[in-house]
Amino acid sequence: MKKTALLMFCALSLTPVFAQKTTITVAAFPAVDEIVKASLQEWQKKNPNVEVKVVGREYADHHTAMTTALATATGLPDVMTIEYGYLGRFAQSGGLEDLEKSPYLLSQHANKMVPYAMAQGRTANHGQVAIPTDIGPGALFYRHDVLTKAKVKESDLTQSWESFIDSGLKIKQSTGAHLVAHARDVKDIVIRTGIPEGEGVYFDAQGKSVIETAPRFKRAFEVAQKIRAQGLDGKINAWSNEWGEALKRGTVTVQMMGAWLGGHLQNWLAPNTSGLWRSTVLPERIATSWGGTFYAIPKKAVHKDLAWSLVQHLALNTRQQQMAFEKFNAFPALIEAQSGDFFNQPVSFLGGQKARLDWKLTASQIKPTMVFKNDSVAEEIVNAELDLVLNKNKPIDQALKDAHRLVQRRASR
């Protein structure tokens, strides 16, 4: 018996002991979830005992779930992805790690990132709570075939808003096509013009509404009203089925959004329109951003060290950032990744344009603006007041006054 026990002990002592795997969770929305999955093979070479679970939800469902997770401190991922539109709300929640503090020390890498995007992830009260991974330099996409038929030049669209509207009249008369899908699209660009440094789209540095006092809001409403009054918009909401059909058929000429729209047009919105689209600067050469994705680490995450390691791989690794752009049209926030042959290649979908160089130039010209907790609330209120101007002829001054009052009331709660 003693001999048998001794042999069993020796056998057990020679059996290799395998380290138990640790699982970390990344919560994301399309196509960020696919970007993360595509990056894991390289990261896991250095972290073989870590399993990464990517929880992908649709855009709205993801942000709703993360809002609940932060409020209740339950169901929190180790890495949270946040789209720009939700950044202000999440950043002010107090539930995210300050990435400038030890052990993260993101400030050591700050000069590697696009400055305006880094500023968007920073708050006065909670520090640098998010790191940008992709950005959306604003661009004007237009149907080249429609402009050719209407004998309108690209410069006619970009010279001024007055010239933009005049071009729309020529296009409508010659082709029957609308200039834009919705007059609201124009308002969204104009209100992002000339924002003072340290302020946001809707709020000043002290968090007070600027909707009634900033001239850019009145001008935005006036331009949008002119477009509606002259029948130049299709009254079509972005991301609707009707919107997609209009882009495919060329019944809408211009769509202004982030540079990432080019990839969406090519891959799923209007794939059969290759060669018919072009990209250019926004009217009056406005340099502004449109969307973008950030990574954050919840304060109550379980595996913060591994989460930070993965976030650095996703956001600060040049090869990874370039892969995300080449495969998923995620324009890199990492400056070093904004170079190489891919940027110089002509984009066949855009008629052979070297559009990525233009987007890179725009990104370098965008001024930092702050985000605020009530940005999304302010946007809803401003849009509702604009609808009253467009559909009910509400006076613009009164609409802006009412919007300002409602936003201030909601912000003070």
Image: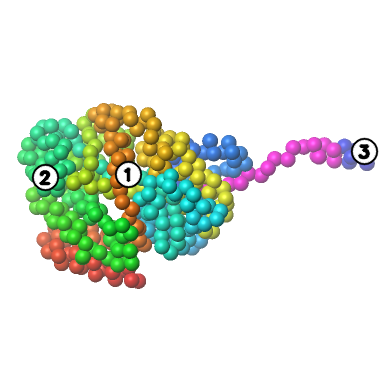
Return the residue nearer the eye: 190 or 389.
Answer: 190
Q: Secondary structure at mark 2?
A: helix
- Viewer-nearest of discs 2 and 3: 2
Task: Kindly report the distance in space between the C-alpha atoms of the residues bearing marks 2 and 1.
Answer: 26 Å
Q: Is residue 161 magenta?
A: no
Q: Which residue is mark 2?
A: 163
* Left or right for 31, reference 239: right
Q: Is residue 407 above or below residue 301?
A: below
- Viewer-nearest of discs 1 and 3: 1
Residue 107's spot in the image, x, y percent? 47, 52
Task: Kindly report the distance in space between the C-alpha atoms of the residues bearing marks 1 and 3.
Answer: 76 Å
Asked if marks 2 and 3 touch (Cβ < 8 Å), the reply is no
> What's the residue type where badge 1 is placed?
Ser
> What's the residue type where badge 3 is placed?
Lys
Return the residue nearer the eye: 72 or 315.
Answer: 315
Q: Which residue is mark 3?
A: 3
Task: Kindly report the distance in space between the C-alpha atoms of the residues bearing marks 2 and 3.
Answer: 97 Å
* Left or right for 335, reference 99: left
Q: Is residue 18 magenta?
A: yes
In terms of sequence position, does the residue under pointer 2 or pointer 3 come before the other? 3
Q: Which residue is mark 1?
A: 364
In terms of sequence position, does the residue under pointer 2 or pointer 1 come before the other? 2
- Viewer-nearest of discs 2 and 1: 1
In terms of sequence position, does the residue under pointer 1 or pointer 3 come before the other? 3
* Residue drawn at 18 percent across, 55 percent down: 220
* Residue drawn at 45 percent across, 62 percent down: 126
Taking the image as drawn, is residue 335 in sight? yes
User: Which stretch appears magenta?
Assistant: 8-26
- The local crowd at label 3, few if under 14, some if 14 to 19, many if 20 or more residues have their Cα within 10 Å, is few
